[in-house]
Amino acid sequence: MKYWVVKFAPFRYSWSDILLNGKFEIYSVRNIQACNNLKQMKVDDKVLFYHSQIEKQIMGIMKVIEEAHKDKTTANNRWVSVTYEPIESFNKPVSLNEIKNTNELADIGLIRQPRLSVMPIKKEYFDIIVKKGTKII
């Protein structure tokens, strides 16, 4: 099993939308590295969902339910989509500032490659973030 972070603007599709619809299909990813990351995802991989651009916080955990398939928003077969379903909402979203202020997360992709929308994450980083998000408030 692998672990990932998927970033998406909440004004396009938010964590609330995912919960309401029971799934999320990422689309319109046009960065080669992000697209290659999508192609590596396998069913049941765990994914942190990050509200990008305005809120900059991780909202919860999803899992891959459909591996890479053609992105319906383009005729070009080069680009792919992946479909996820929500597993757990965080009690408290984990902000980018909180991540930046956690020494153990200094090497995380969210900091090193802030513009990449789909990135792998080490299991140890995933676990740290999940612990922060699921702690009782």
Image (tube, grey):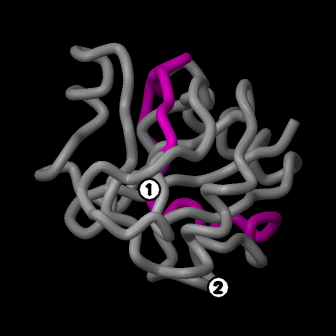
**Nearest to the observer: residue 13 or residue 108:** 13
Disc number for residue 112: 2
Q: Is residue 90 in the magenta section?
A: yes
What residue is at 56 percent from the left and 30 percent from the top?
Answer: 61
Report which quarter residue 39 is drawn in: bottom right
Establish if 42 lies above or below 37. Answer: above
* Mark 1 element type: strand
Establish if 101 lies above or below 72. Answer: below
The amino acid beneath tag 1 is Ser
Establish if 114 lies above or below 37. Answer: below
Position in image of residue 28 (x %, y %): 31, 63
What residue is at 25 percent from the left and 69 percent from the top?
Answer: 53
Q: Quadrant of the N terminus?
A: top right
Give the alpha-carbon distance from disc 1 to disc 2, as whole Å.
16 Å
Mark 1 surroundings within 10 Å by alpha-carbon count, few (fewer than 14), some (14 through 19), many (20 or more) = some
Position in image of residue 17 (x %, y %): 21, 28
Q: Is residue 128 left or right of residue 63?
A: right
Mark 2 surroundings within 10 Å by alpha-carbon count, few (fewer than 14), some (14 through 19), many (20 or more) = few
Position in image of residue 100 (x %, y %): 59, 72
The amino acid beneath tag 2 is Arg
Q: Specify the segment rendered in magenta.
A: 82-105
**Nearest to the observer: residue 27 or residue 112:** 27
> In the rendered image, which residue does mark 1 sit on?
95
Report which quarter residue 122 is drawn in: bottom right
Q: Is residue 127 left or right of residue 20?
A: right
Label 1 close to label 2 by CB (< 8 Å): no
Q: Is residue 69 in the magenta section?
A: no
